Structures are given as C-alpha cells and as structure tokens.
Image (cartoon, rainbow, N blue to C red):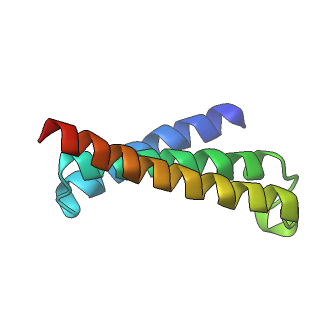
Amino acid sequence: MATFLGIIGVISSFIVFYIGLHVLNLDQDVLQSFIFLKLAVAGHLTIFLARTRGPFWSILVHKTKWDSFLVNHRYETAGDSCCGLWFLHITN
C-alpha cells in the first residue's frame, strides 16, 4: 500500500506541475509555491488515509488531529507567502 501511495504521489505531482506550467501559465515563483502547498496538503492527507481501515470516508478524523492539520497549514501557507515575498524583494 505504501508503494502504491508513493507512486500515486509522484504521478500527481507531475500532473500538478504540468497543469501549473502549461494550462495555468504560472511563473516559476508561483509554480514553486503551488507545488509546495500540493506536497504539504498531500502529505497530511496521506497520513489520514493510511491510518484508516476501509474507505477513508468511513471514519471521521479526530477533532484534535484535524485542528492541528488546519493550524499547520495556516503556518505553512503564511510561511510560504512571507518567504516568497522576502526572496523576491531581495532579488529585485
């Protein structure tokens, strides 16, 4: 199961990269943030999926785990935005 999830993760990353580059015409900086956030969300959702026996929709995630997931993604998004803006400010 872990190998299958890993292969699906790599394939979906390349699909997201292709969509961002050719369909949405994102520049390199936005595309890096797009891929980073995809990897961050997919990593947490894989943990939720791997810890569930049966279909993933059959058991609700515990409130504490869900809250930590949401807080973590707020910080990841804010950190990615701030660091990206900081990096662009220095290079320009």
Q: Is residue 77 found left or right of 42 in the rendered image?
A: left
Residue 7, percent across and down? 54, 36
What residue lies at 15% left-to-right and 36% top-to-bottom?
91
Q: Which residue is more in the foreground, 85 or 22?
A: 85
In the picture, the quarter occupied by the C terminus is top left
Q: Can the viewer see residue 15?
A: no
Q: Is residue 77 found left or right of 17 in the rendered image?
A: right
What residue lies at 74% left-to-right and 52% top-to-bottom?
49
Residue 56, percent across and down? 78, 61
Q: Is residue 59 found left or right of 9 in the rendered image?
A: right
What residue lies at 44% left-to-right and 42% top-to-bottom?
11
Q: Which residue is more in the foreground, 91 or 51?
A: 91
User: Farthest top residue?
Assistant: 3
User: Exactly how many numbered labels are in the figure?
Assistant: 0
Q: Which residue is more in the foreground, 55 or 88?
A: 88
Residue 43, percent across and down? 61, 44
Give the vertical position of 24 relative to 82 (above or below).
below
Q: Is residue 10 found left or right of 4 in the rendered image?
A: left
Give the vertical position of 59 relative to 20 (above or below).
below
In the picture, the quarter occupied by the N terminus is top right
Residue 8, percent across and down? 54, 43
Q: Can the viewer see residue 17?
A: yes
What residue lies at 63% left-to-right and 38% top-to-bottom?
4
Give the vertical position of 49 relative to 92 (above or below).
below
